[in-house]
Image: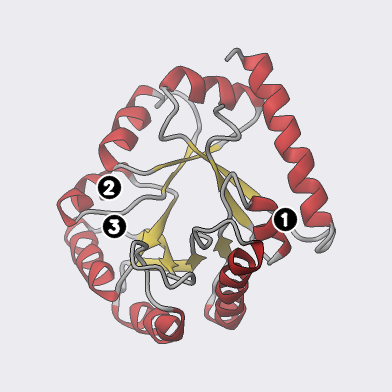
Amino acid sequence: METKDFVTTLDDILTRVEKARLQISEHHIVKIVAASKSADTAMIEAMYHAGQRSFGENKVQDMSDKVHALSSLPLEWHFIGRLQTNKINQLIDLDPFLMHSLSSIELAQELDKRLHVKGKTMNVLLQINSAYEAQKAGVMPEAALEAYEQISLTCQNLRLKGVMSIGAHTEALPVIQKSFETTYKIFESLRSHGAKYCSMGMSGDFELAIACGANMIRLGSVLFK
């Protein structure tokens, strides 16, 4: 896909995002993270020239390859996949803008420990399993507030910036909506604790996520089709 095609694609998505956010409020700003796991560096560069700045990767090694290959561009990198403990040090060295998938207190403690050793900090989102699905990572909704507070108090090298969730894996819109509403309710409760981002919504459900309050969405296939 050439740059002009990415411009058209991005414009189409921005129009849909604009329509969805204005139904909430003209003051409701939504940040798009381009989930680029299926995109090569040429596609990411073309999307950058089309106007996209934030990109998210699911695997640390893929992220490392792309960060280094595209180091001449002022890109904002997000980590949005499951983090294996043996990849923590590598992720820290990549200095991501935001890590979306802090899925447990145990992972938070391990990440914090490694950050402390390296003298670094990391912006993170607490992942919430608001769909109650066994295959999904994340803390359960009823444990989220306590987990957020515990991590905030005990993990000095983590900078909690909000929450992330993945919508329910179903065709039933009311079920997906309920999972988003669950996450947003928790986000609202955490605003007083400094929560800034509610990251939810992907290619198939981002408009519904925005309607439920998302201010950060992770789009892959609709951008890199």
Are the residues tagged 3 and 1 within 8 Å (C-beta)?
A: no
Residue extending farthest to the front is 171
Q: Which mark is residue 91?
A: 2
Task: Give, as a three-letter code, the residue at label 2.
Answer: Leu
Residue 128, quarter of the rendered image: bottom left
Which is more N-terminal, label 1 or label 3? 1
Q: Position of residue 17 (x, y in %)?
A: 74, 47
Q: Specify few, some or many for label 1: CA neighbours under 10 Å numbering under 14, 14-19, or 20 or more.
A: some
Q: Which mark is residue 120?
A: 3
Residue extending farthest to the top is 2
Secondary structure of the residue carrying numbered label 3: loop
Tell which of 134 and 26 is nearer to you. 134
Which is more N-terminal, label 2 or label 3? 2
- Residue drawn at the location 28% of the way across and 42% of the way down: 60
- Residue drawn at the location 68% of the way across and 15% of the way down: 4
- Say which residue label 1 marks: 29
Secondary structure of the residue carrying numbered label 2: helix
Q: Position of residue 61 (x, y in %)?
A: 25, 36
